[in-house]
Amino acid sequence: MIQSATPLSRYLQLAAFLALLASPAAGLAQDLPEGHPPIASERTSDAQGPNSKSADSADTEAKPAAPLLPPTSITHHTVKVAGVPLDYTAEAGTIPLRGADGKSAADVFYVAYTREPKNAKRPITFVFNGGPGAAAAYLHLGGIGPRAVEVNAKGELQGPPPSLTDNPSTWLDMTDLVFVDPVGTGYSRASETKNEEKFWGVEQDTDALTNFVRLYLIKSSRMLSPVFLMGESYGGFRAASLARALQKSGANSPSGVVLISPVLEFSLLYGEDYDPLSWALGLPSLAAVNLESKGVTGRRALASALKEAETYALSDYLVELASGAEAGGKAASGTVSRLTGLPLDVVERRQARISPAFFIKEFDRTNSQVLSRYDGSVSAPDPNPTSSWANGPDPVLDATVPLWTAAFVQYAGSELAYKTDMTYRLLNRDARTKWDFGTSPTRQGYAGVIDEVQEARSANPSLEVLIASGYTDLITPYFASSFLVNQLPSLPRAAPIKVETYAGGHMLYLRPDAREALKQDAKGMYERVMKAAS
């Protein structure tokens, strides 16, 4: 029996029609940046915002509240890679993570890029930034996505205002890409604000993102695709943990992991007051900053010039520091002064133990410049030149947050047709301060993930691992990764871990030369996986 339309149903039909006219896609053409090719877009309704209401809401007389996040947006684009046009589809949306009660506990925002024509046998790479508390915009618009923020040769963002350009070093010709914002970052939110902190921790974060990867692979019919994981900084920690978690859950056995400027063992990052190892592992990075200031630039030149600092750091320097504060400091100060460029009297006062926080303040104090911990080759006027320690904004991180945020929000709204009034959280510092690293009175020490890397390689000997670091990174010193890998026992039949270092800082991919070099080093991984899969 066919029923005639009621006044209420006619009202709902009219409301839906008016909503369609007001869709962001309707104003897409005039929102595109000048010179960008026109794009086609479509909308799907399979992803709802956290505040969306069902059609059978009890309050049928009130006008339904608009969801904070729009439905999934699908757009079509073209980018040139090595002079060859590459067609791809972009999908911006959310995937709900459900709790034990079956209700949505959080909505995880992602942007996925799929090369056309679609091929379920192509590799697919899930990409994460770190923090913890950082959205994926850095790797997305700074590293391997099809569009990138404009930078100079040194990797410094141009602006304000920022601008976007096609990225000739995108990885989209090698792999499909999925950029993921963990809960509390970007546009990802817990269904209830009070529950957001339940996702902030090593185990909690790994569990949530393991679930996200599984759900995305199912939704996209990609369960049989070679899966890669890529993460920067804490995102490297996250990707390593996730690789093993996916194996243990039975959801997937990743084919490769790319770790950029990773923190793999927090004990090496923070160190102990009386453990000389952290001083030794950081020394070559300080030497790299000094070398660049003297005109030694480029990957090969730095690699050659830093051999002395690397050898000294894990030999005589360690022995001298271990011999005692006064005796060791006196023995080491001359060499440390020469390698780092700091005045001898300054090094002697510190007993040859130079922390990054001290170095960035003292290196160019004469000119009232303070260095960035994220790239020691970048400096800015010191807002507190008479202070003993750097206590102003970081020249790389803090100075560029507004640029990255503006660039992503504009890009999402105009090119991806994903417009929302929700605040985009590029960096959620609250998440960092409240993060549960798994330590307690009964479990002391620092969080680490190198064991998970080794276990994942044991479970899948074909697993490819690439660790990439920047020479002038003073947050996660490049020498720490080399040290850790050298401590691992060899695994028969397992693919060796590759460790590569580039001219650049923590976000080494911001330098165009390093970005392309990183892609070329990773290319072999993807080619080997594809060859094995075929």
Image: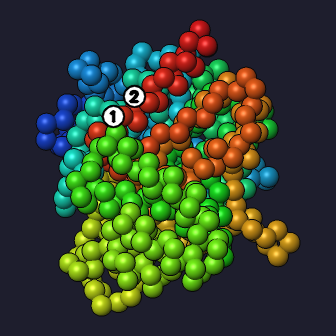
Image side of residue 155 versus residue 486, left or right: left
Question: In percent of the image, x 48 and y 43: which residue is there?
Answer: 468
The foreground one among 444 and 216 is: 444
* Relative vertical location of residue 440 with respect to residue 267 in this rendering, above or below: below
The foreground one among 229 and 407 is: 229
Q: Most extreme residue toward the bottom, as rendered? A: 386
* Relative vertical location of residue 211 with respect to residue 532 in this rendering, above or below: below
Question: In percent of the image, x 13 and y 36: which residue is there?
Answer: 35
Kindly state the secondary structure of the residue where label 2 is placed. helix
Which image quarter holds the C terminus?
Answer: top right
Looking at the rendered structure, the kind of residue marked 1 is Glu
Which image quarter holds the N terminus?
Answer: top right
- Pointer 2 residue: 520
Q: Which mark is residue 403?
A: none
Position in image of residue 379 (x %, y %): 27, 67
Q: How is the image coloured?
A: rainbow
Q: How many marks?
A: 2
Question: In percent of the image, x 67 and y 24: which residue is there?
Answer: 462
Image side of residue 63 versus residue 324, left or right: left
Looking at the rendered structure, the kind of residue marked 2 is Gln
Q: Quadrant of residue 79?
A: top left
- Pointer 1 residue: 516
Look at the image and tell me whether residue 481 can be seen.
Answer: yes
**Within-10-Å neighbours for mark 1: few <14, some 14–19, many 20+:** some
* Relative vertical location of residue 306 with respect to residue 190 in this rendering, above or below: above
Q: Most extreme residue toward the left, as rendered? A: 34
Kindly state the secondary structure of the residue where label 1 is placed. helix
Look at the image and tell me whether residue 60 can be seen.
Answer: no
Measured in 3D between alpha carbons, the distance from the residue under mark 2 to the one under mark 1, in whole angstroms, is 6 Å
Position in image of residue 201 (x %, y %): 68, 62
Q: Most extreme residue toward the top, as rendered? A: 534
